[in-house]
Each structure stands twice: as C-alpha cells, then as structure tokens.
Amino acid sequence: MNSRTFFKIIQLLLYLLLLFNASESRFRRSQHHHICRKESQISFKEREILAKLIFTGTVSRIYKSHSRVYRGIVRIKRVLKGDRRLSDSHVIIDGFGNSKLCKSEVKERDTRIFLVNRVNGRLTLNSSLIRVNVNNLRKVVAAVKSK
Ligand SMILES: *[C@@H]1O[C@H](CO)[C@@H](O)[C@H](O)[C@H]1NC(C)=O
C-alpha cells in the first residue's frame, strides 16, 4: 500500500467516525428530550410546591462520578423558600445530570436558582435549574408567596 492510499483510508475512517458521533449525539439529545418532557408537563407552581428548599446559589465545586448523575458544592446566596439560616452556607447538592430534568447540568461558577429536596438525608435537585434574572426571581418569589 502506498502512502497515498493509506492516507485516503485514514481520511475515510475519520469521516465515518465523525458521522457516527454526530448521529449518536443526536440520538442522545432526542432521548433526553423525550424523558424530560414529563417535567415540562407539570406547571411551575407544582414544581415549586414539590421543592421544600429553593435558593439562589453559585456552584463552587463539581464532583463527577462514573455515573451520569453527579454532585457539587453550592454556596447558597439567598433562600427563597425554606430555612433562611442556610444563607451564606456551603451545601452539597446531589442529582445534577439527572436526565428526567430538562436542565440539570452545571459547571463550576454557575449561578442558578435551585429547587431541591432532601432524599435519604441528601439535598437533591428536584426540578430543572433556573437562570437568575429579575423575571425569573419574580416568578419564583410569587409562586412561593401564593398558597
Ligand atoms: C421531587 O420531590 C418529590 C417529593 O419528594 C418527589 O416525589 C419527586 O420524585 C422528586 N422529583 C425528582 C425529579 O426527583
């Protein structure tokens, strides 16, 4: 085999690999979308009622594991529902990357609104993460107030 043929073969293999990767990630995305649709069917008010603790906070550290779901340390800024004494404390939040939730992925330094519950003694993400902005904060505060 001359070097030119060899190069052609490598090129073809790379092309096939790219094609395979692209279709796989499309499959994963559609699968994820299918699972998280359940969450989008329940109203925001219901999601708020389910969560016993709601706060704004910043992810200070992520601990990825072998499983899809991972945990992280979050510095709580402002408690919107639940024990206000948790403000300014660092807590471990479990359940990031949960495919049942539409938005459950975080990176270090992300600031979000977290809706969590205690599961087997661990604070666990119970609902999709929400971006922090004036509108979203208003929406959450209004939901918590209305009983
Ligand atoms: C959220 O919390 C409620 C009440 O504990 C529970 O029934 C539900 O399964 C939780 N949802 C998720 C996605 O963990």
Image (cartoon, rainbow, N blue to C red):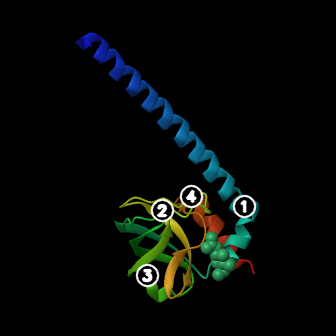
Nearest to the observer: residue 46 or residue 144: 46
Q: Measured from the top left, where is residue 19 in percent x and y?
A: 49, 30
Pointer 3 or 1: first along the chain: 1
Q: Is residue 73 left or right of residue 101?
A: left
Q: Which residue is at 59% across, 63% downward?
A: 128
Q: Measured from the top left, where is residue 140 in percent x and y?
A: 63, 69
What amino acid is found at the position of numbered circle 3 in the picture? Answer: Ser
Q: CA distance from mark 4 to mark 3?
A: 23 Å
Which-is-in-front pick, marks 4 and 2? 2
Numbered mark located on residue 103 in the image: 4
Contact between marks 3 and 2 (CB within 8 A): the answer is no
Q: Measured from the top left, where is residue 50 in percent x and y?
A: 67, 78
Contact between marks 4 and 2 (CB within 8 A): the answer is no
Quadrant position of ligand 1: bottom right
Pointer 4 or 2: first along the chain: 2
| Helix, strand or loop for disc 4 | loop
Nearest to the observer: residue 107 or residue 86: 107
Establish if 17 lies above or below 108: above
What amino acid is found at the position of numbered circle 1 in the picture? Answer: Lys
Numbered mark located on residue 142 in the image: none
The answer to whether one can see residue 144 in this image is: no
Q: CA distance from mark 4 to mark 2?
A: 14 Å
Which-is-in-front pick, marks 1 and 4? 1
Q: Is residue 121 left or right of residue 61?
A: right
Contact between marks 4 and 3 (CB within 8 A): the answer is no
Mark 1 = which residue? 38
Mark 2 = which residue? 68
Q: Residue furthest left?
A: 3
Q: Can you tell me whether the CB of the residue at mark 1 lies under 8 Å from the nearest atom of ligand 1?
A: no
Pointer 3 or 2: first along the chain: 2
